[in-house]
Structures are given as C-alpha cells and as structure tokens.
Image: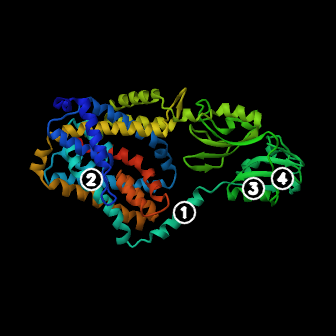
Amino acid sequence: MAELIFEGYFALFLIITLGIMLGSVKFRGFSLDLSAVVFVALIMGHYGIMVPQAFQTIGLMFFIFTVGIQAGPGFFDAFKKTGRQFLGICFLLVSTAALLSYGLGRLFGLDPHLGVGIFNGALTSTSGLAAAIDISGSTLPSIGYGVVYPAGAVFAILIIHLLPVVLRVDMKNEEKKYLDKAHEDFPEVFERNFVVENKNIHGKTIKELAVGTMTMAVISRIRHGSEVFTPGADTRLHLGDIVKFAGTEQALEKVELMIGPETHEQVPQAAGYKVNWLLVTNKQVVNKSLNALNLTAYYNATITRIRRSGIDISPRGTTTLRFGDKVLLACDEENMKKVMKLLGNNEKRLSETNFLPISLGIIIGVLLGAITFPFFGLFEFSLGITGGVLTSALILSKIGKTGPVIWTMSGGGNNLLRKLGLLMFLATVGTHAGAHIAEALAEYGWTLIWTGIMITSIPMILTTIIGHYVLKINFATLLGVVAGSMTSTPGLAAADSKTESDAASVGYATVYPLALVLMIVFSQILSVI
C-alpha cells in the first residue's frame, strides 16, 4: 500500500484532492482556491513523490486552449471600443512588472529562470508560468512561482482594498457613474405600440419606407382593423393601423416621428400566433446574417430581440448569429416549427462538448508554436506550445465556424476541461519543483519574497494612479482592469466587493485575454535574456 503513493496516476489524484480541500479553506475572505494544488505538490515533490511529465503537457494544452476559446471574441472586440484605454493600462502594468523582474533579478543576482517564476508568482499568472517552463525546460520557474504566489495574491487583495481609501475615492458615486454610462452603451430594449397617423406613409410598404433602417427598431406585428398578423417587406401601412415595435428608447422616439403617436391600445396575438425564445444551435446558420436568413420572406417571421451573454441586442439586417444566441421570434404557429428546426433550438446540444474542434485546434496550435521568428536580430523567438495553442484558440474562437466545425465550447464543458488541465499542470510542475525548493530557499532566503512583493505592488499602484488621474477611468472598473491585468482571481473578488454593479467584472474580462498573452510573451523574453 505504501508503494501506491509513488505511482504517478495515484499521486496525481491524491495531490489534486488534497489541494482542492486546502484551497477551499478561507481566512478572512482569502483562499488559495485551485492554486493550493501547487503547494501540496511542492511538499509531495520534496519527499520524492512525482507525477509523470506527460500529465504536465496534456494539462497545459487543455488549460491554455480552453482559456483562448473562451476569451477570443472578447479579446478582439476590446480593441474596437473604449477598452483600448483598459488594454493600455494592462500593457503598462505587465511591462512594468517585467522590467522590475529583470532589474531586480540582476540586482540580487537571481537565476533568470527563477526570476521569471517570481514574475509570474507576483502577478499570479499560471499561463505565464506554463510558458516559462515550456521554453526553459527548467524547474526553477515553478520554484519562484511557488514561493512568491502567496505574497502576490495577498498583496493584490490588500492593495485593491486600500487604494480607494488612500486616494479618497467615493465608490458609491463611481458605481452610479458606471451604471449611467452602461445604460448609454447598452440601452434597454422596449416594446411599444404606435398608431399610424402620418398621412405621408399611408399605403406605402415597409420596404419602401425602410422602417428598420430609418428607426433601428423592429416591427413584430400589426393590427389592421380586426386582423392581426406578422408583417413582411411588402406589407402596406394604413392610417389607423396599430403597429407593435421593439427597440431602444432612441429608436422608438424615431418611430413616433415617422409613424405617429404611441398608443395604449393593445395588439393581441392572432389565433395560432406565437412569440417564443429560441436557441441558435444549428451550425448551418452560425455566422450568417439576418439578411442572409431572410426569415421574413421565407417564414413571415420576425426576430425582435437577440440575447447574447446576458445582454439584449436590438437586431439589424447585418447582425450575425452566434452559437448559443437566444432569439425572440414572432410568427404563426406553423412557421414557428419551421424556424425552430432551422435555428436548432436544441438545449441538449448547447451543453454537449464536441472533442473534434478541441483536438484539431490543439494540433494547429502546436504546429504554430513550432515556427521560429527572428526577434530584431537579437534571438530567435517561437510561441512554443503555450503561445501556439493560445494563439490558435484566440483566432479560431473569433472565426467561430470553419465549414462544419464550430470553434466553440459550452460553458460547462469549457470550465470542466480548463480546471482539469490546470489541476494536471499544477500537480506535475509542483512535484518536480518540490525536489529543488529547499535548496532555492536556502540560497536566496527572503530575497525571493521581497522581490515578489515589489513586483506586485509597484505596477498596481502606478497604473491605478495613471488610470484614475490621467485617463479618468471609472474607479470601480479600474480596479477590475488592474485585477485582470494581474490575472488575479483573488484580486477580482476584492474589486467586486467594492461595488454592487458588474463594473469590476467587465474591466477584468476586457483585459484578461491580453494579460494572458502579454504574460506569455514577457515570460518567454525573460527566459532567454
């Protein structure tokens, strides 16, 4: 029985089990969460209990690929919006931390591989650690990471709690500003009825009037006398008609100017008329625009609202459907069944995980990572397994679909595979690092910890001051941006506690993909200079 603990497969699950148990322990709101696995593994490795190296590579690829698939659309979309300021903060924080790591490492005479581990531990970045181990082939990065991570996580939380107090920021006021701005960026979609009183549009078709283009609102149904129906492009509007529109407040104001005044008269559903939420799960319609589907012409059906990632979107002809979208469809009962079949509406399929895109995406990433590039003539640079797989996942998730292959994963499937990969990776690198951690502590002592604290604290404070006073970023969002730039989940929890809105979470999600990429790039650079 005693020999069983030294078997690689048994050691893997023993370390994972003990690590999860330890990570669930909270002290004043702080817990190590899944990162506790690496500390259990360090102890096990110190006593000669090892997990085979193959588990590390497999776990690494699962973890990085699922992170990229989840983050891809947000990563590219962030460049199109005001998120550019957030990404600038992210770049400044990570690059400052990298420069500090290089400078302090040279000052204290630390091994470069140990220094890159401190860099990742201070910023609590597992993906950066994976990149450093991948390119260096050394256990020193995981030793530096394991020693510094606890101090990095704790100080990230402390600084986020202290910054509003030290800078005298009114968090309630910042929250109100954020909510007001969010309402402008993602206006709520309403449904209202209008009576046709504009004589200039009497007898003209919806197509002739270009109602959708002129108002950005959508007609769901019309009451003409006692008849109620879903309109088509050739439907004519007549004086006295009651028209039901869906759109933003601004869009409905345009409707009133174009059609006539709002009315409280109702537009009842006709016999056999349905309004249902449908799921987009048919891969044949993914990435197709509403114009291309032309549901009005083929099925006399109208999509009045699209719900994506918890946000209601007012549809336009150029709006493309994504796998997992929920659409509010209005049409008669017979056509409802046809559109339901067209869109898929298969909740079971939404929760399924197809392994073909995962394995194929990882293969593409590994091949991409094997390509070497010259870096300004100084040295050759390759993405490695980590960077290649991450780049592949980011691009494929943005593409969304290639032929019959959909580059998406269900939320549950992604979360499970990401955690499994992370646990396998942490357990393996921890045991191999544990065999050498005693020697590292004996040689460097508290130097590692103090170095890590400086790399954590200085960039956080610097970027917060610049973001607040120079870029005028909402402080509730800024705390999330700083936590995301640190790839610090404990930091996000601290930032979330400062506001009842989703300001911190939005900031975190915007920069987190870029932070992952930057941590990998700087980890590789620090490993070879």
State the SS at label 4: strand
Check if mark 1's residue and mark 4's residue have beta carbons within 8 Å. no
Q: Classify residue 288 by image quadrant.
A: top right
511 horizontally vs 236: left or right = left
Earlier in the chain: of badge 1 and badge 3, it is 1
Between tags 4 and 2, which lies in front?
Answer: 4
Label 2 and label 1: CA atoms lie apart by 32 Å
Q: Quadrant of the N terminus?
A: top left
Relative to 519, residue 345 above or below:
above
Label 3 and label 2: CA atoms lie apart by 53 Å
Label 4 and label 2: CA atoms lie apart by 63 Å
Pick whichever, 400 or 92, lies toward us.
Answer: 400
Which numbered disc covers residue 271? none
Instruction: Kindly tell me whether residue 461 is visible in this rendering.
Output: no
Density class for disc 3 (Cα within 10 Å; few <14, some 14-19, many ≥20) is some
Density class for disc 1 (Cα within 10 Å; few <14, some 14-19, many ≥20) is some
Earlier in the chain: of badge 3 and badge 4, it is 3
**Outermost residue toward the bottom in this view:** 168
**x, y (%) of residue 153?**
29, 55
Circle 3 is placed at which residue position? 192
Check if mark 2's residue and mark 1's residue have beta carbons within 8 Å. no
Residue at 61% x, 50% y is 312
Circle 1 is placed at which residue position? 179
Residue at 35% x, 54% y is 490
Pick whichever, 352 or 67, lies toward us.
Answer: 352
Q: Classify residue 191 by image quadrant.
A: bottom right
Label 1 and label 4: CA atoms lie apart by 34 Å
**x, y (%) of residue 377?**
27, 39
Label 3 and label 4: CA atoms lie apart by 10 Å
Circle 2 is placed at which residue position? 122
Residue at 30% x, 46% y is 21
